[in-house]
Image (tube, coloured by chain):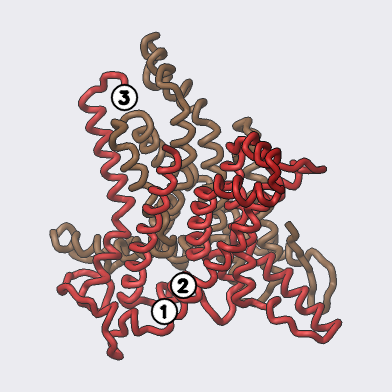
């Protein structure tokens, strides 16, 4: 049954088989995507026609490699930009929120905390459409009343950032809060006693303590923003992010260039994920 | 949470006509109910599939491999959902990898269309949401003292009894929080049903999207969105009442 108890051979075998199957199930789609990125064929399917880097490097009309496909490169760039801004804003907002909910007392704290957590249980599609409706109504109202056209209120790069920010900051809030809970107050008390100002205490004592949580939360925020689809879909303007661009390509039939992009994504995110895990592991020990 | 639902017919008139359309048109109803039942089914299946894994990692495997298995488990989920769904499409579709090998080995002589049906869609949904079930399960099971199981076994309890009387109640908070997240994600999922479900697999988020982007009927779409939100809150509320858990505990 468990580690400390004797187990029958059959039980062990069945369990092992199940685990193996599960991991195959888990990795099959990713592995096959990666492999087919190097297939020397015009379609992302078998048979295997030999190894080729065409889908990365080639620059002919029939085979436009990833590094020459401006459309894809552009969307990758936009995604990186979006994720960068979203993670910076979410980190600032989420950390401030964590301080607020962990260290301050104020009226209706529970209710506000509940409100802050709410984005976690709202489907991304609904978040997207409500933001679209809200900004659009506001935009129309301002245009009708004041004759001003405010571009940020229409689907655009910045609106995507606002939309992703609205729920990613909640994740940051949770991660940082968890870390802040473990903070020993006597440290900051000591610092205050020794004549540090409140800001100095935060700068030199609390922030270094929070650093691993901040790095972890930042990495998660970046990835979440980078791959967000549901909310972005409704807010995106003319600059499409990578997930949207990929979606359009997948839906409208595809060339192995998607495999090439996927391969790059899988490799970079895996590296990031492992780095993140290693960093947080060290902290636990 | 401000979900504005403006019901304007032609010139800004407040009315419930958008909601009426929902109740009159049977296709909307059908999709709505279908989405809800499938989401519950997916949540349940996800639990069934991932529970043995969580149990294995926390209780069975030797601690040496535990960290490795966990990292391996988490890695695919850092990759965008779209890429994972795309991987499944390559595997399953008519000209896909699985069909290719089945033909090579002479098991079938004509490719089978495995994509674009409810089974593949549900499998895809389970696949994309497994992580959100397995992480809370692992953390719940990790806190459990093995001696409970040992004691029960010494006292002559069967495996069945141990499972339902000890393990499940102990893991209940993990199960509930995992289920809530999986349920919400599935209900609000757009990509997987859209890409793997094909034309005859309707999902309510697709209806919302269609109202917004295709028909440009924003008010109708907003009404649908609001209904989806009500539905999800209602089901979660009922589930919490049945399992006697509470939301703030499940979320933290």
Classed neighbour count for the residue bearing mark 3: other residues with Cα under 10 Å, few (<14), some (14–19), many (≥20):
some
Picture disc at residue A123: none
Picture disc at residue A72: 1
Judging by the rendered image, the residue that carries numbered circle 3 is A3
For chain B, give the colour: brown
Q: Which chain is red?
A: A
Residue in front for this viewpoint, B252 or A209: A209
Whether discs 1 and 3 lie on one chain: the answer is: yes
CB under 8 Å between discs 2 and 1 = yes
Classed neighbour count for the residue bearing mark 1: other residues with Cα under 10 Å, few (<14), some (14–19), many (≥20):
many
Image-quadrant location for residue B5:
bottom right
- Vertical side of A179 occupied by B15: above or below: below
Q: Mark 1 or mark 3: which comes first in sequence?
A: 3
Question: Residue lying farthest left?
Answer: B105
Residue B203 on image: x %, y %: 54, 60
Residue drawn at x 21%, y 64% is B100
Judging by the rendered image, the residue that carries numbered circle 2 is A242
Residue drawn at x 42%, y 20% is B162
Relative horizontal placement of residue A177, taking residue A13 as reference (left or right): right
- Vertical side of A201 occupied by A267: above or below: below
């Amino acid at each position: 049954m468990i580690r400390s108890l004797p187990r029958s051979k059959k039980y062990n075998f069945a369990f092992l088989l199940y685990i193996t199957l599960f991991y195959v199930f888990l990795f099959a789609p990713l592995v096959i995507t990666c492999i087919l990125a190097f297939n020397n064929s015009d379609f992302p399917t078998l048979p295997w026609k030999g190894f080729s880097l065409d889908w990365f490097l080639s620059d002919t009309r029939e085979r436009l490699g990833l590094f020459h496909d401006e459309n894809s490169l552009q969307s990758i760039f936009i995604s990186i930009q979006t994720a960068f801004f979203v993670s910076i804003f979410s980190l600032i907002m989420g950390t401030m929120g964590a301080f607020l909910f962990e260290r301050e007392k104020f009226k209706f704290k529970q209710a506000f905390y509940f409100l802050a957590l709410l984005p976690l249980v709202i489907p991304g599609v609904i978040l997207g459409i409500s933001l679209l409706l809200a900004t659009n109504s506001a935009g129309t109202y301002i245009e009708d009343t004041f004759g001003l056209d405010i571009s940020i209120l229409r689907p655009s790069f910045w609106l995507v950032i606002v939309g992703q920010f609205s729920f990613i900051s909640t994740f940051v809030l949770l991660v940082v809060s968890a870390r802040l809970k473990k903070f020993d107050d006597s440290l900051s008390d000591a610092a205050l006693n020794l004549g540090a100002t409140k800001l100095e205490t935060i700068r030199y004592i609390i922030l270094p303590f929070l650093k691993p949580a901040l790095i972890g939360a930042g990495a998660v925020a970046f990835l979440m923003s980078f791959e967000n689809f549901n909310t972005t879909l409704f807010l995106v303007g003319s600059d499409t992010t990578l997930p949207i661009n990929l979606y359009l390509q997948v839906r409208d039939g595809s060339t192995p260039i998607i495999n090439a992009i996927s391969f790059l994504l899988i490799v970079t995110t895996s590296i990031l994920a492992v780095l993140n895990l290693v960093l947080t592991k060290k902290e636990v020990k | 949470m401000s979900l504005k639902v403006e019901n304007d017919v032609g010139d800004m008139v407040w009315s419930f006509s958008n909601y009426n359309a929902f109740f009159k048109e049977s296709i909307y109803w059908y999709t709505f109910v279908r989405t809800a039942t499938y989401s519950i089914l997916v949540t349940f299946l996800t639990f069934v599939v991932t529970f043995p894994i969580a149990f294995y990692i926390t209780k069975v495997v030797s601690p040496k491999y535990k960290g490795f298995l966990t990292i391996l488990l988490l890695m695919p989920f850092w990759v965008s959902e779209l890429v994972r769904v795309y991987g499944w499409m390559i595997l399953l579709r008519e000209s896909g990898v699985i069909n290719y090998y089945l033909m090579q080995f002479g098991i079938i002589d004509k490719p089978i269309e495995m994509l674009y049906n409810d089974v593949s869609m549900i499998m895809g949904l389970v696949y994309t949401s497994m992580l959100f079930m397995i992480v809370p399960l692992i953390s719940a099971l990790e806190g459990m003292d093995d001696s409970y199981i040992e004691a029960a076994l010494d006292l002559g309890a069967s495996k069945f009894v141990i499972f339902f009387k000890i393990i499940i109640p102990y893991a209940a908070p993990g199960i509930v929080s995992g289920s809530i997240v999986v349920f919400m994600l599935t209900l609000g999922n757009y990509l997987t049903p859209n890409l793997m479900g094909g034309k005859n697999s309707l999902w309510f988020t697709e209806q919302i999207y269609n109202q917004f982007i295709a028909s440009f009927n924003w008010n109708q779409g907003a009404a649908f969105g609001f209904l989806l939100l009500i539905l999800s809150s209602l089901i979660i509320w009922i589930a919490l009442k049945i399992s006697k858990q509470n939301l703030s505990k499940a979320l933290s």
